[in-house]
Image: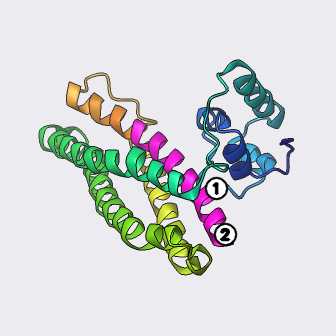
């Protein structure tokens, strides 16, 4: 694949998985914003296009070549990967993060009640939405795809994409509320662990949503 200024972010991420490291480094949305041309995405972030292209080339040239190309793998294997490596860990991580957020709010709310309160609200909301979202995928959409009825799934796919976009908005707000996940100097261990957990959640969800929006859904709809 020759990457140009007009190549979509999602296409680059699908065909060159290592490029997602570069996109994450520069805050370029490669999941919900996967349809944007690379030039537009770079301009939106104030990043030089040539710099991003050079970093992508470097990642590809200097990293091991065993990165899985999920756009080449069977849909059943991709769905298994999504459920096993993203859905199942999320079902453990979301309650853990919600528990830490409750503890931080209960102990430290007098220091910043409005912000800590909104962080708790966002995490609880994200947990509720994602748990329902994953259940709908596993009980409705994924079985349709596995049964060979992917082209008939345009309605469920549209709903899932809209829910992905809303989750992305909530993650962006959490990044803003946490000062880019930089804890205050006087933050306790739980507070620091919460910020670190949220940053990892953001990364994992970006990859997760990318696999669905940019690879699984398009392939299923045209299968």
Q: Position of residue 99 (x, y in %)?
A: 18, 45
**Which one is nearer the viewer's eye here, 126 or 186?**
126
Please rate how many residues cluster around mark 1, counting C-alpha atoms within 10 Å: few if below 14, some from 14 to 19, many from 20: some
The magenta span reads 200-222
- Which residue appears farthest toward the top when viewing the image? 62
Please rate how many residues cluster around mark 2, counting C-alpha atoms within 10 Å: few if below 14, some from 14 to 19, many from 20: few
Residue 125: in sight, yes or no? yes
**Which one is nearer the viewer's eye here, 181 or 97?**
97
Q: Quadrant of the N terminus?
A: top right
- The residue carrying mark 2 is 223
Residue drawn at x 68%, y 36% is: 19
Residue 32: in sight, yes or no? no
Position of residue 35 relative to residue 109, above or below, is below
The image's mark for residue 182 is none
> Considering only order in the chain, which callout, 2 or 1, is on the residue closer to the N terminus?
1
- The residue carrying mark 1 is 33
Judge from the rendering whether residue 80 lies leftward or rightward of residue 45; answer left or right. Answer: left
């Amino acid at each position: 694949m020759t990457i140009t200024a007009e190549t979509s972010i999602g296409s680059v991420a699908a065909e060159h998985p290592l490029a997602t490291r570069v996109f994450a480094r520069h805050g370029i949305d490669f999941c919900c914003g996967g349809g944007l041309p690379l030039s537009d995405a770079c301009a939106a972030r104030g990043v030089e296009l040539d710099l991003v292209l050079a970093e992508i080339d470097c990642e590809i040239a200097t990293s091991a070549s065993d990165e899985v190309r999920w756009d080449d793998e069977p849909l059943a294997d991709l769905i298994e990967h999504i459920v096993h490596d993203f859905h199942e860990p999320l079902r453990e991580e979301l309650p853990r993060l919600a528990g830490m957020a409750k503890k931080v709010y209960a102990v430290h709310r007098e220091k910043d009640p409005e912000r800590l309160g909104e962080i708790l609200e966002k995490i609880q909301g994200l947990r509720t939405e994602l748990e329902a979202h994953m259940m709908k995928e596993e009980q409705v959409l994924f079985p349709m795809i596995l049964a060979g009825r992917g082209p008939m799934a345009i309605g469920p796919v549209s709903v899932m994409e809209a829910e992905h976009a809303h989750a992305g908005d909530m993650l962006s707000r959490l990044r803003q509320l946490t000062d880019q996940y930089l804890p205050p100097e006087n933050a306790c261990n739980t507070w620091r662990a919460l910020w670190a957990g949220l940053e990892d959640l953001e990364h994992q969800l970006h990859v997760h949503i990318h696999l669905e929006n940019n690879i699984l859904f398009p392939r299923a709809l045209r299968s």
